[in-house]
Image (spheres, coloured by chain):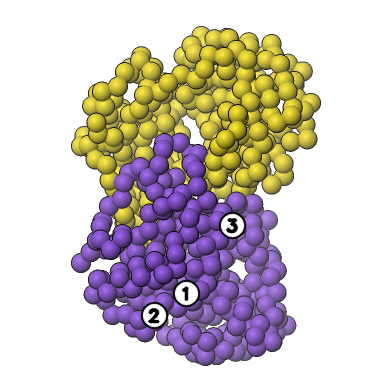
Chain colours: A purple, B yellow
Amino acid sequence: MPDWFNQGEAIDQVSISDRGFQYGDGLFETIAIREGEPRLWRYHIDRLAKGCRVLGIKMPSESELYEGLCHALQRSDIATDRAGVKVIVSAGSGLRGYARPFVDSPTVLYHAFSAAPVAPDFYRSGIETVICATRLASGSATAGLKTLNRLEQVLARSELAGTDSFEGLTLDAEDNIICGTMSNVFFVNDKSVSTSPLDRCGVEGVMRRHVIETLDRQGIVVDIQACSLSRLADTDEVFLSNSQFGVIPVRACGETKWPVGQVTRNVMTIMASHQVPECRP
Amino acid sequence: MPDWFNQGEAIDQVSISDRGFQYGDGLFETIAIREGEPRLWRYHIDRLAKGCRVLGIKMPSESELYEGLCHALQRSDIATDRAGVKVIVSAGSGLRGYARPFVDSPTVLYHAFSAAPVAPDFYRSGIETVICATRLASGSATAGLKTLNRLEQVLARSELAGTDSFEGLTLDAEDNIICGTMSNVFFVNDKSVSTSPLDRCGVEGVMRRHVIETLDRQGIVVDIQACSLSRLADTDEVFLSNSQFGVIPVRACGETKWPVGQVTRNVMTIMASHQVPECRP
């Protein structure tokens, strides 16, 4: 079974001189497929377009991306009721050296994969997390974007090997909790929901945006506000968002424990009615 | 002419699933070749070994690396009196997702290239620089290392297109001058030499280390001390170091101009007698 597709052709290699390999000069999206259709497609397109603007890469047309995604799904012979497609947009092969002009013809690659659901108990009882020793650098020119420069996440996520933790939370140098290695984090205090600002580091998840905008339409304002590590134990509830699993309660971070609280359950109920049925509590 | 070599074989592609491509999960060194031999080999090995420790990758043996470098030079049919070899050590093909175990068998790739000298006038009269708008993120888990996560340098260096600037200087969020996009920066004040600390961002260049250690043996201590942008105009002299060009005076940064000063000339004279003959002033 072919793994990756480029312009309709199955491929399994890229040029060594591809700037994605040489410098991590590119972007990606990992798109959840539900009932054969990409979920939160608009938000993936928006983030990719923003990344292309910052990196100086021509954004592939939405129709090209949609066709590429559907083609990869069809050719990959997997069940599309629940799957995922990873799309990579790299700056392509270019001259040696860091400098490059605007990229008119990026390399666009598609990979479809089966996506097993997370354990139902995670939605009911919450998951365990830890604080990662790996910190996120602050003041990044690509903060919020999903670029191919992901060493921080590789190092942070690799810390979890051999532990019971489902996710690791990463801090900046000032002990602010920024996000999970593959998720965004929300905090509940006195019934108010907040999530960390991502203008200096971290990745702006599409599910984070979906939660913020969906709650806003319900009259629930999510504050964009840093939560320092020292305040974590005093937080009433914590939950995570991710494009694949939706919303999941956090029941522990190291020694700090939380119940699955009423606000988190309410958020999950709302999200379950808005394209994320798997998180119905 | 083959471009890249892996285990003695000429190749021009890598697996799309190589973690170097997916996440920038790897390291590289660009080694100057002079009279057929790698210059500052020991320092390149040291930095690569440190990077392998931080990333959790088995460091290839020094003899393997040396043989690979020589092989790439021989096969590439270029003049080796003055050349370069780029070595990439990537975490190789692995599971999808950020987490990975320690990498026992990294992918090691070699690329030899001809290296034209920079204009002699640059050594005599200095070069022009600018301050890049792209800032370096601070507090990086891979500060100092030469990883495959190089988007900051790509963005900063690309700012120079169409300008007369030979190099761009990059700042952190606190307006400290950290390094050039492909060089390290030294400052001279009242005959004292200093260079920026690189424990929170930037790349620790092998030529920077060579300058610091060579001057130290001459009784000249280089202070590791930040230079803020606001102090740049009051600095007596500025020079850059890089593994390929050695040491070059800076004659301008934007509107700020400097003469090629006596201390810089003295440093260049010393370095010219210590493996860097091209920078004899």
Q: Which quarter of the image is occupied by the C terminus of chain B?
A: top right
Q: Are marks 1 and 2 in contact (CB under 8 Å)?
A: yes
> Callout 2, which amino acid?
Glu
Q: Which quarter of the image is occupied by the N terminus of chain B?
A: top left
Q: Which of the labelled discs sits on residue A229, or is there none?
A: none
Q: Viewed as shown, does residue B126 lie left or right of A75? A: right
Is residue A174 positioned above or below A276 on the image?
Answer: above
User: Disc 3 to disc 2, how far (Cα)?
Assistant: 28 Å
Q: Viewed as shown, does residue B14 lie left or right of B237? A: left
> Callout 1, which amino acid?
Trp
Q: Give the residue displayed 69% in from the left and 11% down from the top.
A: B262
Chain containing the residue with disc 1: A
> Callout 3, which amino acid?
Ala
Pointer 2 residue: A37
Q: Viewed as shown, does residue B275 lie left or right of B200? A: left
Pointer 3 residue: A143
Is residue A124 positioned above or below B192 on the image?
Answer: below
